[in-house]
Amino acid sequence: MDERRPVVLVMCTGNSCRSQMAEGFLKTFGGDRLEVHSAGLEPKEAVHPMAVEVMKEVGIDISGQRPKSSRVFLGKLAVRYLIIVCSNAEQSCPRLFLGAIERHFWPFDDPAAATGTPEEQVAVFRRVRDQIKERIETWLKLVNAEGKIIK
């Protein structure tokens, strides 16, 4: 019997905003039952500063997280739940991840593409953060103590 927690991999293109926020929420709310990672198809150099800022506002510090390539995990990690948070990654993501049992597509707007004043941009980050949080809280209600989806 496998004693490891089921693996969740959150994917997006740059792995600097949406997937990093999702990773932070999943680790905070479900880290006791899930092993959580995030990755990008074309990872950026760093986590977006506004993503770090808006997550701190809700008490989650993602400043130590770093963007990673999907190649770090592809074929090397048995992923039970693959969660894709952007349309570009959905179209480009490899269709098969080792052990992936469930693939979820949760598209969120890209806050890094927000324009306007700094206040308007951070408002977009907050909106997307709150949408991600709500979706994760809803999904985690379906995941039991062993990390399996309750049907």
Image (spheres, helix red, strand yellow):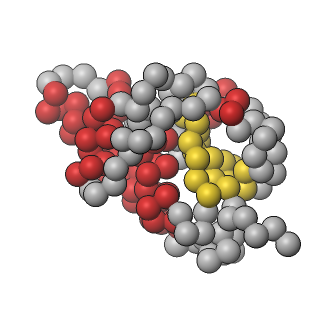
For the point 22% across and 31% down, the residue is: 121
84 is higher (above) or lower (below) than 7: above
Q: Position of residue 8 (x, y in %)?
A: 63, 53
- Which image quadrant for residue 68? top right
Specify whether 93 is left or right of 113. right
For the point 53% across and 46% down, the residue is: 106
Q: Looking at the image, how many numbered discs can be counted on the residues? A: 0
- Which image quadrant for residue 69? top right
Instruction: Answer yes or no: is residue 37 visible.
Output: yes
For the point 27% across and 56% down, the residue is: 58
Locate the C terminus and report the quarter of the image it occupies: bottom right
Q: Nearer the viewer, residue 3 or 86?
A: 3
Outermost residue toward the right in this view: 1
Q: Position of residue 48 (x, y in %)?
A: 36, 30
Outermost residue toward the front in this view: 64
Specify whether 27 is left or right of 144. left
For the point 16% across and 27% down, the residue is: 118
Q: Position of residue 14 (x, y in %)?
A: 50, 27
Q: Nearer the viewer, residue 12 or 59?
A: 59
Q: Nearer the viewer, residue 111 or 54?
A: 54
147 is higher (above) or lower (below) than 82: below
Specify whether 140 is left or right of 55. right
Instruction: Answer yes or no: is residue 18 visible.
Output: no
Specify whether 40 is left or right of 1. left
Locate the N terminus and report the quarter of the image it occupies: bottom right
Q: Position of residue 140 (x, y in %)?
A: 53, 67
